[in-house]
Image: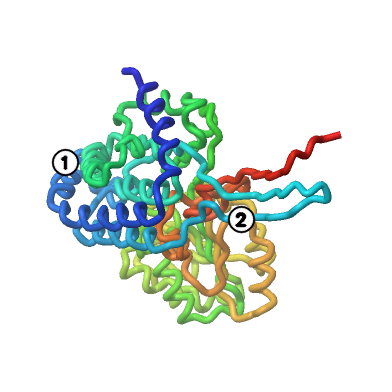
Amino acid sequence: MNYKQYFEKARQASRTMISLSKETTDVVLTDLATALVANTGDILVENAKDLAKMPIEDPKYDRLKLSAARIADIANDLINVAGLSSPLGKIISDKTLENKLHIQKVSVPLGVVGVIYEARPNVTADVFSLCFKTGNVAVLKGGSDAEFSNLAIAKVIHNVLNSHGISTDVLTLLPAERAATEALLNARGFVDVLIPRGSQSLISYVRENSKIPVIETGAGIVHTYFDESGDLEKGKAIIFNAKTRRVSVCNSLDCVLINQNRLNDLSALLSPLAAGNVELFADEKSYEVLKASYPAQLLNQAKSEHFGIEFLSLKLAVKVVADLDEALNHIANYSSKHSEAIISEDAANIAQFLNEVDAAAVYANASTGFTDGAQFGLGAEIGISTQKLHARGPMGLEELTSYKWVVRGDGQVRD
């Protein structure tokens, strides 16, 4: 198959995006929200075809599954994006030199944004909305697991674009076959940046093989440290929410660290997890405490491989630490630099944790489940970056822009 034609059309379409007004962009996104809800039935039929191919126990099953409520949430995110201010044309800096040259630093689109993702059909709509709002063209390569779902959502998007007389090339959904991934990785000169969303293996593969600049959206190996001064009721609610709200997403909790001086509260702290059918992998000290109260069929002794793993399921590691410093060392050794939290009433310990932990999002007395573009007021997200160049954490509109220098003169020449 000639994939180059897709990339050429996307590059050509990117030149037309700059002429779209903010008003047109927002109307398109609002109309798309309405159209997605109106086509819920058709989308769910296609989603059922994808679900039928995947075992229900697969951690990706929940990410793949759509419902009327989830489609409504996607539509609401589109409306939220439409309501946000455009970051385009923002004057980042403005100065006039002694030679009277007027120099401005102005925000502009990245251009053509490629995204490779696995079984998350909501990404199709989310990425389109953010790219469209920021004047970017989106080239998407979804996984075969979500092929029918992605096609159904892309069809709705293309229909709305057609109704407004806008080229459908502003959204390209590549075929689900593996060859399309290889072509996208090598689309240098056509695609400006590539963003992988999915498992660590996918992200690593893209980073190691792409000839296009990559923004990594890393796996989430997430810890919550319960400090000596931690409030028990806050801790129970935060840990239960961070682990069970939605286990298949990257902000889900993977490891609880507890100060050794609060071991007497460990059973109570984790008791809600038993009702949530959470399987624990406890180190020696925590296992000795928990075996008297936690269901035996859900309690295991931890091995070294249970730390530093993204479970993406109802599993959780537990470790006792001597103090905050040991907790910080453990997180430094095992964190994927995604989201980390402390539960504490000690202002100095909170300040030290927030200052020293190297992660895209750090929390004090709150669930890591909030690491999400919509929750951060970004409308939606194109991914959660765990790197430090260009973007970090939930990536919204501003992270999909670059800048250029605009220089105005009146005949100046350089000596």
Left or right: residue 402 versus residue 195 is right
For disc 1, the marked residue is 49
* Residue 47 % position (x, y): 19, 45
The CA span between labels 2 and 1 is 48 Å
Check disc 2: other Cα within 10 Å, few if <14, some if 14-19, many if 20+: few
Q: Is there any visible trace of residue 194 in the rendered image?
A: yes
Left or right: residue 109 versus residue 311 is right
Left or right: residue 328 versus residue 24 is right
Looking at the image, which is closer to me, 342 or 191?
A: 191
Screen quadrant of the C terminus: top right
* Kind of residue indicated by mark 2: Ile
Q: Quadrant of residue 299?
A: bottom left
For disc 2, the marked residue is 91
* Residue 233 % position (x, y): 46, 81
Considering only order in the chain, which callout, 1 or 2, is on the residue closer to the N terminus?
1
Residue farthest front in this picture = 411
* Residue 345 % position (x, y): 60, 81
* Kind of residue indicated by mark 1: Lys
Screen quadrant of the N terminus: top left
Looking at the image, which is closer to me, 358 or 237?
A: 358
Left or right: residue 392 versus residue 62 is right
Tell me what residue is drawn at x 67 percent, y 50 percent: 104
Q: Are marks 2 and 1 in contact (CB under 8 Å)?
A: no
Say which mark, if any, is on residue 255. Answer: none
Instruction: Give the color scheme: rainbow, by chain, secondary structure or one colour.
Output: rainbow
Check disc 1: other Cα within 10 Å, few if <14, some if 14-19, many if 20+: some
> Disc 2 vs disc 1: which is toward the camera?
2
- What SS does tag 1 mark? helix
Tell me what residue is drawn at x 59 percent, y 74 percent: 227
Q: Is residue 312 above or below residue 261?
A: above
Q: Is there any visible trace of residue 297 in the rendered image?
A: no
